[in-house]
Amino acid sequence: VTVMIAAIVSTYAGGFYGDTEKSPQSSLRVTHDPDLPRIYFEHNGGDPFMLGSIKVILRANDNKTTMSLRDAGSSLVRNFTEVGTPGDNNDTAIQAGDTFFIEGKGSGTEMEFGDMILKNNTKIIWLVVDRETSKTISMGSFFL
């Protein structure tokens, strides 16, 4: 009886373990351009990820905006691309040493991403999230 119970519990618990989806975990350093409405994300280590499989969430005060590669060229975000790749909107692999950026409207001291306006001396909380699992890949904050 004990062996049967152990086998049933093991089978049942094993089913839970197999269903968990793993999302990438990476270390990103985020900076902004003082002259352009760009926010740069430098991959400093950890798992690689595809640019098209993430979304970037920005929060400042009570405002929040979410953008992805699909939004590139819209009023939300002009560019969402890897630095150094020819052309825009490339779904490329981002790995250690690579940098991608999002570009809105405005200047480096006042950036606009859709309805969200980020002004100088504002704390911005950022998250890079895996779109498929909705799990955070990396997060942090910076001051504009």
Image (cartoon, helix red, strand yellow):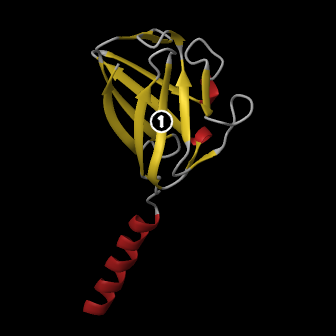
- The total number of labels drawn is 1
Query: Front-most of 87 and 84?
Result: 84
Location of residue 72 in the rendering, given as x and y in whole percent from the top left corner: 63, 23
In the image, farthest residue toward the right: 87
Going by the numbered disc 1, the residue's amino acid type is Phe
Query: Would you say 88 lies left or right of 135 here?
Result: right
The residue indicated by pointer 1 is 41
Q: Residue at x 54, y 26 (%)?
A: 102
Q: Residue at x 40, y 67 (%)?
A: 17
Query: Would you say 80 lies left or right of 112 here?
Result: right
Query: Would you say 143 lies left or right of 11 here?
Result: left
Task: Classify mark 1: residues with Cα within 10 Å, few (<14), some (14-19) or many (20+).
Answer: many
Q: Secondary structure at mark 1?
A: strand
Location of residue 132 in the rendering, given as x and y in whole percent from the top left corner: 53, 44
Q: Quadrant of residue 30?
A: top left
Q: Residue at x 46, y 61 (%)?
A: 19
Quadrant showing the N terminus = bottom left
Query: Front-most of 33 and 60?
Result: 33
Position of 142 relative to 74 (above/below): below
In the image, farthest residue toward the front: 35
Query: Front-most of 110 and 11?
Result: 110
Quadrant showing the C terminus = top left
Query: Would you say 88 lies left or right of 128 here?
Result: right
Position of 5 relative to 43 (above/below): below
Q: Quadrant of residue 70?
A: top right
Q: Residue at x 57, y 18 (%)?
A: 77
Location of residue 32 in the rendering, given as x and y in whole percent from the top left corner: 44, 24
Location of residue 54 in the rendering, given as x and y in whole percent from the top left corner: 53, 39
Q: Is residue 106 visible?
A: yes
Q: Is residue 1 visible?
A: no
